[in-house]
Image (cartoon, rainbow, N blue to C red):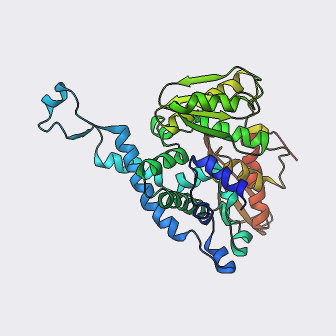
């Protein structure tokens, strides 16, 4: 992992490390340290798990709880300092579970593209451990653990990084629906277009004018500057060599969302967006398993689920039947049959891929 990699990761999570070694350690798997020595990310996972829980609870309380502040509220409660919420403990437990469960954390690592930086031993490399949900969950927690240690357990900083990595406000405001998730959509577009990640710059408003003047010296003005929102935090989003898209809000995550929304609307209005059909250059049966996995890693749907059954062909010879299913707009499930597991899996994946990409026939 080089300095550019570390800077890319810091840009994605919205936090600059004082101790870069801690950030790198968050990406080191035990398999690597056992083969090469040094520390790994296991203890950071433990720390991050606890820090993540606390940050998510605070995010939920900030969103759904408040203290009585006016006389009308005081009339309704004996103690004016009481904490008030319309949600029950069970409802909070369910929301928290959705935000920190393995499926969500693994999905967010896929969206952020961070598992590509994992430092693994040969055993992990040979079995493509970077694609395993549990490995991605561990990585998410290890990054939070590294942030917690580096910032001296500043809850404000930990919460900010968690909000950015989880994009929690989108999920809470949209009942965990992926639709119109502008931050993720822009990230997918930039990765497809430039094979890199979008650049975000966060500025406190008392420094914004100065930063803007300095930054504009190196920007080619290909379009008018676009700004949205208001607040004490400004986020500039760069997706090309033109003027940045600017969001203003009272938190980094909200400012980032507004900037991404502007960028998405600009791309859409100028017919610059691409769809899922543009993601795979040459869809084919031979590569269907990998191509379906690639689409899942880019966040279009969860990892495909494969289920095998022993079967027989029309002549009564033993064969394998494989079912492949995904949730994409609706549940899609197809099966393939072959004399080998690999062949059956490939055929099932190809059937599903053709449905997703709306391909008739195919090679």
Above or below: residue 142 compared with residue 353: below
Give how far across and how far down residue 267 sits, in percent: 71, 27
Q: Is residue 58 left or right of residue 106?
A: left
Give how far across and how far down residue 293 sits, in percent: 71, 53
Q: Is residue 94 left or right of residue 116?
A: left
The residue closer to the viewer here, 132 or 45, is 45
Location of residue 187 (image quadrant): top right
Location of residue 317 (image quadrant): bottom right
- For the point 84% across and 42% down, the residue is 361
The reply to whether residue 326 is in sight is no
The residue closer to the viewer here, 312 or 128, is 128
Assign the N terminus to one quadrant of the image. Answer: bottom right
Give how far across and how far down residue 332 sits, in percent: 65, 45
Location of residue 323 (image quadrant): bottom right
The residue closer to the viewer here, 355 or 85, is 85
Give how far across and how far down residue 37 sits, in percent: 65, 79
The residue closer to the viewer here, 332 or 235, is 235
The reply to whether residue 249 is in sight is yes
Marker count (numbered) = 0
């Amino acid at each position: 992992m080089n300095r550019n990699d570390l800077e890319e990761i810091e840009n994605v999570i919205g936090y600059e490390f004082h101790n870069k070694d801690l950030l790198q350690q968050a990406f080191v798997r035990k398999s690597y340290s056992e083969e090469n020595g040094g520390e790994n990310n296991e203890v950071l996972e433990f720390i991050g798990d606890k820090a993540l829980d606390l940050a998510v609870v605070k995010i939920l309380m900030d969103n759904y709880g408040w203290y009585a502040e006016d006389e009308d509220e005081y009339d309704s409660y004996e103690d004016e300092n009481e904490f008030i919420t319309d949600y029950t403990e069970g409802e909070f437990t369910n929301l928290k579970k959705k935000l920190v469960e393995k499926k969500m954390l693994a999905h967010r690592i896929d969206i952020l593209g961070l598992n590509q930086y994992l430092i693994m031993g040969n055993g992990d490399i040979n079995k493509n451990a970077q694609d395993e949900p549990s490995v991605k969950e561990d990585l998410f927690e290890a990054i939070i653990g590294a942030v917690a240690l580096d910032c001296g357990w500043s809850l404000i900083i930990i919460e900010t990084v968690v909000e950015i990595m989880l994009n929690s406000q989108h999920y809470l405001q949209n009942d965990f629906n992926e639709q119109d998730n502008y931050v993720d959509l822009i990230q997918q577009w930039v990765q497809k277009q430039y094979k890199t990640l979008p650049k975000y710059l966060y500025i406190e408003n008392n420094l914004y004018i100065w930063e803007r003047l300095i930054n504009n010296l190196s920007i080619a003005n290909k379009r008018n500057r676009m700004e949205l929102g208001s607040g004490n935090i400004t986020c500039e989003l760069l997706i090309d060599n033109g003027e940045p898209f600017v969001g203003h809000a009272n938190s980094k995550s909200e400012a980032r969302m507004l900037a991404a929304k502007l960028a998405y609307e600009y791309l859409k209005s100028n017919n610059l967006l691409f769809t899922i059909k543009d993601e795979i250059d040459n869809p084919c049966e031979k590569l269907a398993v990998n191509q379906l996995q690639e689409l899942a890693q880019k966040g279009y749907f969860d990892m495909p689920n494969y289920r095998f059954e022993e079967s027989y062909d029309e002549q009564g010879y033993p064969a394998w039947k494989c079912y492949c299913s995904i949730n994409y707009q609706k549940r899609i499930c197809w099966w393939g049959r072959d004399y080998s597991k690999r062949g059956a899996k490939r055929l099932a994946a190809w059937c599903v891929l053709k449905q997703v990409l709306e391909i008739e026939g195919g090679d």
